Amino acid sequence: MPGCEVDGMEQPRPLDALNRARDKRVMVELKNGRQLSGVLKAFDIHINVVLDDAEETENGQLKRKLGNVFIRGDTIIMINPS
Amino acid sequence: MPGCEVDGMEQPRPLDALNRARDKRVMVELKNGRQLSGVLKAFDIHINVVLDDAEETENGQLKRKLGNVFIRGDTIIMINPS
Amino acid sequence: MPGCEVDGMEQPRPLDALNRARDKRVMVELKNGRQLSGVLKAFDIHINVVLDDAEETENGQLKRKLGNVFIRGDTIIMINPS
Amino acid sequence: MPGCEVDGMEQPRPLDALNRARDKRVMVELKNGRQLSGVLKAFDIHINVVLDDAEETENGQLKRKLGNVFIRGDTIIMINPS
Amino acid sequence: MPGCEVDGMEQPRPLDALNRARDKRVMVELKNGRQLSGVLKAFDIHINVVLDDAEETENGQLKRKLGNVFIRGDTIIMINPS
Amino acid sequence: MPGCEVDGMEQPRPLDALNRARDKRVMVELKNGRQLSGVLKAFDIHINVVLDDAEETENGQLKRKLGNVFIRGDTIIMINPS
Amino acid sequence: MPGCEVDGMEQPRPLDALNRARDKRVMVELKNGRQLSGVLKAFDIHINVVLDDAEETENGQLKRKLGNVFIRGDTIIMINPS
């Protein structure tokens, strides 16, 4: 997934950052204030995301284990590779 | 439904995870805080979803049985195969 | 309306479930918490819906009769064939 | 505006119901809880609507007369031909 | 801007009503409950609107004069030619 | 950016008003109730806007200086050339 | 990324301002009231943004360090190059 060209130079794109985070642990913050951590397995242009080994955390404390989970992109505020 | 190609390698896509969950029991969380569990029978790119044998649960307790139900994708936060 | 092909097999789609519910009584839940029951006469890809013989119910009690009603899709959470 | 074909049969579409209500009195419910009644003069695929002789009502009581009014579709919950 | 054809007859469209209100005074109601009156100078398919000689009113009382103002369409509930 | 043609006459479009306000001071009102004033340097069809020499004001009082700022269009209610 | 032409003259576009801010420190304000500062590494037309060396601040005080972070565009109010 190469970046787009601007004045003959390639510029990085936001999805490149997600691509680098693939198979690594990320923290996903949702619009309802919840936080999920997990291994980023897949994403698409809508920022729909699949995490493996996912856990919901609250103030850094484990709240529940979710395992494999599909998250709809429009509920996501940010994704933070750790 | 094969993944998209990136640098000659196929990458998994979020909908692949839903496809693997087809005919299996999933937990669907809605933006209004409700939780539905049921057997995933169908989904589309909008994440519209059809569950069979669906039940609404509250804090893990059965609240009511819904049977077959169509859920509009934009009300969904996450889908969690069990 | 046949399903989409995946690996040579046809997969069911969410709108197929609505198509099977045509001319049957359904319960429609709206984002504002209201519930409408009626006979499903028409729907489209936006999940705009037309019900005949529609009634608004509250906690299972009849609140008012609406007759024929057009419901805008983006206000719908779920559609539940009875 | 004929219906779409499904398995060789024409199926009714939601906008057909609005078309039948043209030049008739309808009740329009908005997402902010308000109710407008008026004669349906025009609509489009976004469910933008024009009413003539429109009145805002509250619990069935006339609140104010609006005459001709354009209503943006994304504010509408339902349209109820009387 | 002629209407669309239905069964060989032209049907009026919602934007026709706005076109007739061009250069006339209209009342615009916003989703945040505010009301703006002004002379409708321009609109587009998103219902972005430009008013001249605009005033914000509250319960029919002048609150402040705005002069020329661009209003983003997705904040508008209704437009009411006077 | 000429207007669109209607019945052989050119009609003004909303973005024309923004184009006339380019390099002039405007007041931008946001959906969260905040007000930004600044010199309009750029805009696009999403009503994404760039202001120079921007200031946030509250009830007409300067709250803070922002300098150059990019504002996402979907957060804007109205733009008011002064 | 050159500007668009209007009457033979090139006009600046909002994304040009973001392009100039690339690799510089920016303040990003989110719709939920939070503020993130960081080095702008990437953005796209949805205003999805990637920041490096990101920090969340509250009233100008450091709240937590985030490092590299992907922010979904629809959660952003404004981006303010410092």
Image: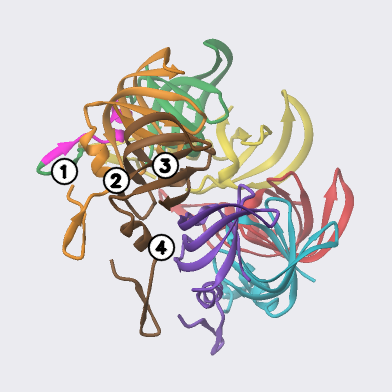
Chain colours: A purple, B brown, C orange, D green, E yellow, F red, G cyan
Q: Position of residue C26 (x, y in %)?
A: 31, 27
E76 sits left or right of C66 in the view = right
Q: Is residue B10 visible?
A: yes
Give residue A9's quadrant in the image.
bottom right
Label 2 is found on which chain of the structure?
C
CA–CA distance between discs 3 and 4?
29 Å
Give residue G81's quadrant in the image.
bottom right
Pointer 2 local density, CA inside 10 Å: few below 14, some 14–19, many at least 20: many
For label 3, the residue is D46
Type of amino acid at the residue the image marks with label 1: Glu
Q: Which residues are magenta?
A: D9-20
Q: Is residue B15 above or below residue E45?
A: below
Type of amino acid at the residue the image marks with label 4: Pro
D38 sits left or right of G39 in the view = left
Q: Is residue E6 visible?
A: no
Q: Is residue D11 magenta?
A: yes
CA–CA distance between discs 2 and 3?
22 Å
For label 1, the residue is D5
Q: Position of residue G14 (x, y in %)?
A: 63, 67
Q: Is residue D5 magenta?
A: no
Q: Label 3 near label 1: C-beta < 8 Å?
A: no
The residue sitting at 35% across, 73% down in the picture is: B4
Q: Label 2 near label 1: C-beta < 8 Å?
A: no
CA–CA distance between discs 4 and 2?
17 Å
Residue C14 badge: 2
Q: Is residue D59 above or below residue B6?
A: above
Type of amino acid at the residue the image marks with label 3: His
